[in-house]
Image (cartoon, rainbow, N blue to C red):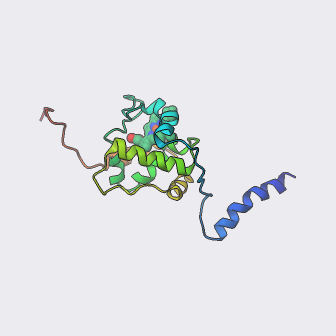
Amino acid sequence: MKRGFLILVTLPWAAAAVAGQMVDRPVNLARNGRTPHVNYMTECQGCHLPDGSGMAGKVPAMKGEISRFLTVEGGRQFLIQVPGAANSKLSDADLAAVMNWIITTMGKPAAGTFTPYTPEEVASYRAHSLQDVATVRGRLVSRFAVQEPPTGATSSR
Ligand code: HEC
């Protein structure tokens, strides 16, 4: 009984993998009918705050910062694989839409530099969870280009 059930659930995945449509898991294209902004409000802003400014020492700011991950190799995957995003209850389609919304409203990438995530891309990243978030994040951040200090800041050197 139990074995029969297992075969039944794994069959569609295996069949699709054989057909070469996907490698890791099926893409969840279901939409919950809410706008990306509303999904952000219900699933993300409790920690990230409405404007993405985060909580000092606990939740990093996405506002003005998030696009920097897109400038380093592995950053595009990281934004989806980070637990708050990957483990949310949003489908791949809704998560892609939320991330595209976050990046374009809070990250303000330079015009023409951001290729929106597709549900298929999100599914492929989500299939691999991050083992050590802090280490991976630290490695990515260390590769960010050094930014000019904010105007008005005084240097001690
Ligand atoms: C329970 C709190 C919490 C929730 C809810 C949450 N996050 Fe996060 N998020 C974090 C923390 C903490 C980090 C820093 C990395 C880590 O430790 O996971 C983070 C990091 C991120 C990052 C990478 C930014 C960076 O600088 O590291 C993205 C992108 C992100 N979250 C997106 C989301 C999205 C999208 C949602 C909603 C679907 C969400 N998060 C929900 C706490 C949360």
User: Does residue 69 sit above or below 57 in this rendering?
Assistant: below
Question: Can residue 57 be seen from the camera position used here?
Answer: yes
User: Does residue 52 sit above or below 9 in this rendering?
Assistant: above
Q: In the picture provided, is 156 more to the left or to the right than 127? A: left
User: Does residue 153 sit above or below 146 in this rendering?
Assistant: above
Between residue 15 and residue 75, name the one nearer to us. Answer: 15
Between residue 115 and residue 74, name the one nearer to us. Answer: 115
Between residue 119 and residue 34, name the one nearer to us. Answer: 34
Question: Can residue 134 be seen from the camera position used here?
Answer: no
Residue 46, percent from left and from top: 48, 30
Quadrant for residue 151, please give it. top left
Residue 39, percent from left and from top: 51, 39
Which residue is at 45% across, 46% downward? 99
Which residue is at 59% across, 41% downward? 89
Between residue 28 and residue 129, name the one nearer to us. Answer: 28
Q: In the picture provided, is 68 more to the left or to the right than 27? A: left
Q: Residue furthest bottom?
A: 19
Quadrant for residue 49, please give it. top left
Residue 33, percent from left and from top: 56, 44
Which residue is at 70% across, 66% downward? 15
Quadrant for residue 114, please give it. bottom left
Residue 112, percent from left and from top: 30, 57
